[in-house]
Image (cartoon, helix red, strand yellow):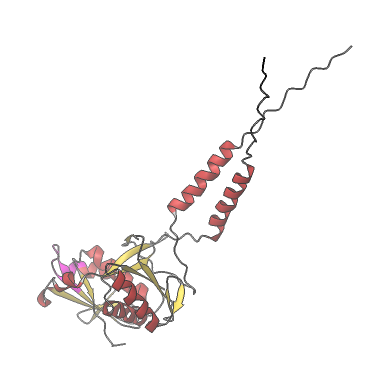
Amino acid sequence: MRLRPAKPPGRLITLVPLVDAMLILLVFFLVTSTYLDLDRLPLAETRQQAGAGAGPADTLLIRLAPDGTAVISGRPVGDLETAARVALGPDPVAGVLLFPSPAASVQALVSAMEALTRAGAPSIRIVRTDAP
Amino acid sequence: MKLSRPRPRAMPETILPLIDVVFFLLVFSLLVGRMDATAPFELTPPVSDAGTDLPGGGVMVMVSSDGALALDGTAISPVALSLALEEALDASPDLSVRINADGEGALRHLLTLIGRLEEVGAREILLVVTPDPR
Protein backbone atom coordinates (compact mmCIF):
# COMPACT_ATOMS: atom_id res chain seq x y z
CA MET A 1 0.00 0.00 0.00
CA ARG A 2 1.27 3.39 -0.99
CA LEU A 3 0.40 6.23 1.28
CA ARG A 4 0.33 9.76 -0.04
CA PRO A 5 1.61 12.45 2.22
CA ALA A 6 -1.14 14.69 3.43
CA LYS A 7 -1.41 17.98 1.57
CA PRO A 8 -0.20 20.90 3.59
CA PRO A 9 -3.08 23.16 4.56
CA GLY A 10 -3.46 26.20 2.26
CA ARG A 11 -2.22 29.46 3.60
CA LEU A 12 -4.91 31.45 5.25
CA ILE A 13 -5.40 34.82 3.61
CA THR A 14 -6.24 37.33 6.27
CA LEU A 15 -8.72 39.99 5.33
CA VAL A 16 -7.65 42.45 7.97
CA PRO A 17 -5.17 44.36 5.73
CA LEU A 18 -7.90 44.67 3.09
CA VAL A 19 -10.28 46.15 5.62
CA ASP A 20 -7.54 48.49 6.80
CA ALA A 21 -6.85 49.70 3.28
CA MET A 22 -10.54 50.21 2.53
CA LEU A 23 -11.12 52.06 5.77
CA ILE A 24 -8.18 54.32 5.04
CA LEU A 25 -9.53 55.00 1.55
CA LEU A 26 -12.99 55.71 2.93
CA VAL A 27 -11.71 58.08 5.58
CA PHE A 28 -9.48 59.77 2.99
CA PHE A 29 -12.44 60.45 0.69
CA LEU A 30 -14.62 61.61 3.55
CA VAL A 31 -12.01 63.98 4.92
CA THR A 32 -10.61 65.45 1.71
CA SER A 33 -13.91 65.89 -0.11
CA THR A 34 -15.94 69.04 -0.07
CA TYR A 35 -19.57 68.28 -0.58
CA LEU A 36 -21.28 70.91 -2.71
CA ASP A 37 -24.66 70.77 -4.34
CA LEU A 38 -24.02 72.41 -7.68
CA ASP A 39 -26.50 73.10 -10.49
CA ARG A 40 -26.21 74.86 -13.80
CA LEU A 41 -27.81 77.79 -15.56
CA PRO A 42 -27.25 77.83 -19.33
CA LEU A 43 -25.63 81.13 -20.30
CA ALA A 44 -24.93 80.69 -24.00
CA GLU A 45 -26.48 78.63 -26.70
CA THR A 46 -25.14 77.80 -30.14
CA ARG A 47 -24.90 80.70 -32.54
CA GLN A 48 -27.44 79.12 -34.88
CA GLN A 49 -30.06 79.09 -32.13
CA ALA A 50 -29.09 82.57 -30.97
CA GLY A 51 -30.01 84.00 -34.36
CA ALA A 52 -33.62 82.91 -34.08
CA GLY A 53 -36.03 84.36 -31.57
CA ALA A 54 -38.33 87.21 -30.86
CA GLY A 55 -38.01 90.37 -32.91
CA PRO A 56 -37.23 93.76 -31.40
CA ALA A 57 -40.95 94.63 -31.18
CA ASP A 58 -41.62 91.57 -29.03
CA THR A 59 -38.87 92.27 -26.60
CA LEU A 60 -39.04 93.37 -23.00
CA LEU A 61 -36.05 95.49 -22.02
CA ILE A 62 -34.83 95.28 -18.47
CA ARG A 63 -31.86 97.11 -17.01
CA LEU A 64 -30.04 95.86 -13.98
CA ALA A 65 -28.68 98.71 -11.85
CA PRO A 66 -25.30 98.46 -10.07
CA ASP A 67 -27.11 97.67 -6.80
CA GLY A 68 -28.98 94.81 -8.49
CA THR A 69 -32.32 96.60 -8.80
CA ALA A 70 -34.20 95.82 -11.99
CA VAL A 71 -35.42 98.79 -14.00
CA ILE A 72 -38.27 98.44 -16.50
CA SER A 73 -39.21 101.45 -18.63
CA GLY A 74 -37.14 103.71 -16.42
CA ARG A 75 -38.87 102.64 -13.23
CA PRO A 76 -37.10 100.59 -10.57
CA VAL A 77 -38.98 97.40 -9.78
CA GLY A 78 -39.04 95.81 -6.37
CA ASP A 79 -40.44 92.43 -7.33
CA LEU A 80 -39.08 91.60 -10.75
CA GLU A 81 -41.05 88.37 -11.09
CA THR A 82 -44.42 90.10 -10.66
CA ALA A 83 -43.45 93.05 -12.83
CA ALA A 84 -42.19 90.77 -15.59
CA ARG A 85 -45.33 88.64 -15.35
CA VAL A 86 -47.45 91.76 -15.85
CA ALA A 87 -45.26 93.04 -18.68
CA LEU A 88 -45.10 89.70 -20.47
CA GLY A 89 -48.79 88.93 -20.13
CA PRO A 90 -50.51 85.62 -19.49
CA ASP A 91 -49.13 83.93 -22.61
CA PRO A 92 -45.62 85.29 -22.94
CA VAL A 93 -44.14 85.25 -26.41
CA ALA A 94 -41.82 88.17 -25.90
CA GLY A 95 -38.16 87.61 -25.25
CA VAL A 96 -36.33 89.54 -22.60
CA LEU A 97 -33.25 91.63 -23.20
CA LEU A 98 -31.35 92.11 -19.98
CA PHE A 99 -28.87 94.97 -19.73
CA PRO A 100 -26.92 94.34 -16.54
CA SER A 101 -24.60 96.96 -15.16
CA PRO A 102 -21.01 95.65 -15.08
CA ALA A 103 -20.89 96.80 -11.47
CA ALA A 104 -23.84 94.63 -10.45
CA SER A 105 -23.05 91.34 -8.74
CA VAL A 106 -23.22 87.91 -10.33
CA GLN A 107 -25.87 87.03 -7.74
CA ALA A 108 -28.03 89.94 -8.95
CA LEU A 109 -27.91 88.62 -12.51
CA VAL A 110 -28.72 85.08 -11.39
CA SER A 111 -31.63 86.29 -9.25
CA ALA A 112 -32.97 88.35 -12.17
CA MET A 113 -32.72 85.37 -14.51
CA GLU A 114 -34.47 83.20 -11.96
CA ALA A 115 -37.30 85.71 -11.54
CA LEU A 116 -37.70 86.04 -15.31
CA THR A 117 -37.76 82.27 -15.75
CA ARG A 118 -40.48 82.04 -13.08
CA ALA A 119 -42.42 84.78 -14.84
CA GLY A 120 -42.43 82.61 -17.96
CA ALA A 121 -40.00 84.51 -20.18
CA PRO A 122 -39.40 82.23 -23.18
CA SER A 123 -35.91 83.57 -23.80
CA ILE A 124 -33.51 85.80 -21.93
CA ARG A 125 -30.62 87.50 -23.63
CA ILE A 126 -27.93 89.31 -21.76
CA VAL A 127 -26.52 92.40 -23.41
CA ARG A 128 -23.13 93.62 -22.31
CA THR A 129 -22.96 97.34 -21.71
CA ASP A 130 -20.10 99.59 -20.73
CA ALA A 131 -22.37 101.79 -18.63
CA PRO A 132 -21.66 101.69 -14.90
CA MET B 1 -8.69 11.17 38.06
CA LYS B 2 -10.60 14.35 37.35
CA LEU B 3 -11.02 15.28 33.77
CA SER B 4 -11.79 18.87 33.00
CA ARG B 5 -14.06 19.57 30.14
CA PRO B 6 -12.44 21.29 27.21
CA ARG B 7 -13.45 24.92 27.01
CA PRO B 8 -15.78 25.64 24.15
CA ARG B 9 -13.92 27.40 21.38
CA ALA B 10 -14.89 30.98 20.93
CA MET B 11 -16.68 31.72 17.70
CA PRO B 12 -14.31 33.30 15.26
CA GLU B 13 -15.31 36.90 14.68
CA THR B 14 -16.22 37.24 11.08
CA ILE B 15 -15.15 40.49 9.57
CA LEU B 16 -16.99 39.93 6.33
CA PRO B 17 -19.98 42.12 7.31
CA LEU B 18 -17.54 44.88 8.22
CA ILE B 19 -15.89 44.61 4.83
CA ASP B 20 -19.30 44.70 3.19
CA VAL B 21 -20.31 47.84 5.01
CA VAL B 22 -17.01 49.60 4.37
CA PHE B 23 -17.16 48.61 0.72
CA PHE B 24 -20.72 49.90 0.38
CA LEU B 25 -19.74 53.20 1.97
CA LEU B 26 -16.70 53.49 -0.28
CA VAL B 27 -18.64 52.77 -3.46
CA PHE B 28 -21.46 55.05 -2.33
CA SER B 29 -19.14 57.99 -1.75
CA LEU B 30 -17.45 57.35 -5.10
CA LEU B 31 -20.73 57.17 -7.00
CA VAL B 32 -22.60 59.99 -5.33
CA GLY B 33 -19.78 62.49 -5.50
CA ARG B 34 -18.05 63.90 -8.48
CA MET B 35 -14.40 64.77 -8.47
CA ASP B 36 -13.93 68.38 -9.38
CA ALA B 37 -10.90 70.55 -8.96
CA THR B 38 -11.27 73.09 -6.20
CA ALA B 39 -10.58 76.74 -6.85
CA PRO B 40 -7.25 78.15 -5.66
CA PHE B 41 -9.17 81.04 -4.10
CA GLU B 42 -12.24 81.55 -1.94
CA LEU B 43 -15.35 81.10 -4.06
CA THR B 44 -19.04 80.93 -3.26
CA PRO B 45 -21.26 80.28 -6.28
CA PRO B 46 -24.47 82.29 -6.68
CA VAL B 47 -27.65 80.87 -5.19
CA SER B 48 -30.51 79.92 -7.49
CA ASP B 49 -33.35 77.44 -7.46
CA ALA B 50 -33.79 77.64 -11.22
CA GLY B 51 -30.70 75.55 -11.92
CA THR B 52 -30.76 72.02 -13.27
CA ASP B 53 -28.36 69.17 -12.63
CA LEU B 54 -24.81 69.97 -13.54
CA PRO B 55 -23.51 67.52 -16.12
CA GLY B 56 -20.10 65.97 -15.89
CA GLY B 57 -17.29 66.55 -18.34
CA GLY B 58 -16.16 69.80 -19.88
CA VAL B 59 -13.85 72.30 -18.34
CA MET B 60 -14.41 74.47 -15.32
CA VAL B 61 -13.37 78.11 -15.30
CA MET B 62 -13.38 79.70 -11.88
CA VAL B 63 -13.73 83.45 -11.33
CA SER B 64 -12.98 84.98 -7.95
CA SER B 65 -14.75 88.05 -6.59
CA ASP B 66 -11.84 90.24 -7.71
CA GLY B 67 -11.69 88.74 -11.20
CA ALA B 68 -8.84 86.26 -10.78
CA LEU B 69 -9.22 83.25 -13.06
CA ALA B 70 -8.50 79.55 -12.71
CA LEU B 71 -8.88 76.72 -15.16
CA ASP B 72 -9.74 73.36 -13.61
CA GLY B 73 -8.28 74.45 -10.29
CA THR B 74 -5.08 76.06 -11.57
CA ALA B 75 -4.68 79.84 -11.54
CA ILE B 76 -4.28 81.19 -15.05
CA SER B 77 -4.00 84.56 -16.80
CA PRO B 78 -6.76 85.71 -19.18
CA VAL B 79 -4.49 85.35 -22.22
CA ALA B 80 -3.33 81.88 -21.24
CA LEU B 81 -6.94 80.90 -20.55
CA SER B 82 -8.03 81.95 -24.02
CA LEU B 83 -5.17 80.00 -25.58
CA ALA B 84 -5.87 76.88 -23.50
CA LEU B 85 -9.58 76.97 -24.27
CA GLU B 86 -9.00 77.63 -27.95
CA GLU B 87 -6.78 74.56 -28.08
CA ALA B 88 -9.31 72.46 -26.16
CA LEU B 89 -12.19 73.64 -28.36
CA ASP B 90 -10.22 72.90 -31.52
CA ALA B 91 -9.82 69.34 -30.29
CA SER B 92 -13.41 69.04 -29.11
CA PRO B 93 -15.74 71.73 -30.53
CA ASP B 94 -18.71 70.66 -28.40
CA LEU B 95 -16.80 71.04 -25.16
CA SER B 96 -19.00 72.50 -22.47
CA VAL B 97 -17.45 75.30 -20.44
CA ARG B 98 -18.68 75.65 -16.89
CA ILE B 99 -18.14 78.97 -15.17
CA ASN B 100 -17.98 78.91 -11.43
CA ALA B 101 -18.05 82.58 -10.51
CA ASP B 102 -18.22 84.07 -7.04
CA GLY B 103 -21.73 85.35 -6.42
CA GLU B 104 -20.52 88.59 -4.87
CA GLY B 105 -18.10 89.37 -7.70
CA ALA B 106 -18.83 92.18 -10.14
CA LEU B 107 -20.47 91.18 -13.39
CA ARG B 108 -17.80 92.90 -15.45
CA HIS B 109 -15.46 89.97 -14.82
CA LEU B 110 -18.09 87.39 -15.77
CA LEU B 111 -19.34 89.25 -18.86
CA THR B 112 -15.80 89.82 -20.12
CA LEU B 113 -15.08 86.12 -19.67
CA ILE B 114 -18.24 85.10 -21.52
CA GLY B 115 -17.29 87.39 -24.40
CA ARG B 116 -13.84 85.86 -24.47
CA LEU B 117 -15.29 82.33 -24.44
CA GLU B 118 -17.58 83.13 -27.35
CA GLU B 119 -14.63 84.56 -29.25
CA VAL B 120 -12.69 81.32 -28.93
CA GLY B 121 -15.73 79.36 -30.12
CA ALA B 122 -17.36 77.97 -26.98
CA ARG B 123 -20.87 76.83 -27.89
CA GLU B 124 -22.11 75.71 -24.53
CA ILE B 125 -21.43 77.93 -21.56
CA LEU B 126 -22.96 77.06 -18.21
CA LEU B 127 -22.99 79.06 -15.02
CA VAL B 128 -22.58 77.03 -11.87
CA VAL B 129 -25.14 77.85 -9.18
CA THR B 130 -26.06 76.27 -5.91
CA PRO B 131 -29.62 75.73 -4.67
CA ASP B 132 -30.88 77.77 -1.77
CA PRO B 133 -30.04 75.77 1.36
CA ARG B 134 -33.27 76.92 3.08
A77 vs B24, nearest the viewer: B24
Give coordinates of residue A103: x percent, y percent: 35, 83
At 14% from the left and 62% from the top, the residue drawn is A90
- Give the quarter of the image for residue B82: bottom left
Residue lying furthest front = A1
At 38% from the left and 79% from the top, the residue drawn is B81
Assess whether residue A89 is covered by the magenta stretch: yes
- Left or right: residue A91 versus residue B106 is left
Give coordinates of residue B88: x percent, y percent: 33, 72
Give coordinates of residue B11: x percent, y percent: 67, 28
- Give the quarter of the image for residue B77: bottom left
**In the picture, which quadrant includes the C terminus of chain B?**
bottom left
Task: Say if residue B59 shows up in the picture.
Answer: yes
Give coordinates of residue A94: x percent, y percent: 14, 70
B3 vs A72, nearest the viewer: B3
At 64% from the left and 42% from the top, the residue drawn is A16
- Left or right: residue B18 versus residue B44 is right
Residue lying furthest top = B1
Write the start and end of the magenta stretch as one range: A85-96
- Left or right: residue A28 versus residue A84 is right
- Give the quarter of the image for residue A43: bottom left
Residue lying furthest bottom = A131
B34 vs A127, nearest the viewer: B34
A4 vs A47, nearest the viewer: A4
Task: Say if residue B103 shows up in the picture.
Answer: no
Q: Is residue A130 above or below residue B4?
A: below
At 73% from the left and 22% from the top, the residue drawn is B8
Assess whether residue A64 is covered by the magenta stretch: no
Q: Is residue B7 above or below residue B117?
A: above
How many numbered discs?
Answer: 0
Q: Is residue B28 above or below residue B54?
A: above
**In the picture, which quadrant includes the N terminus of chain B?**
top right
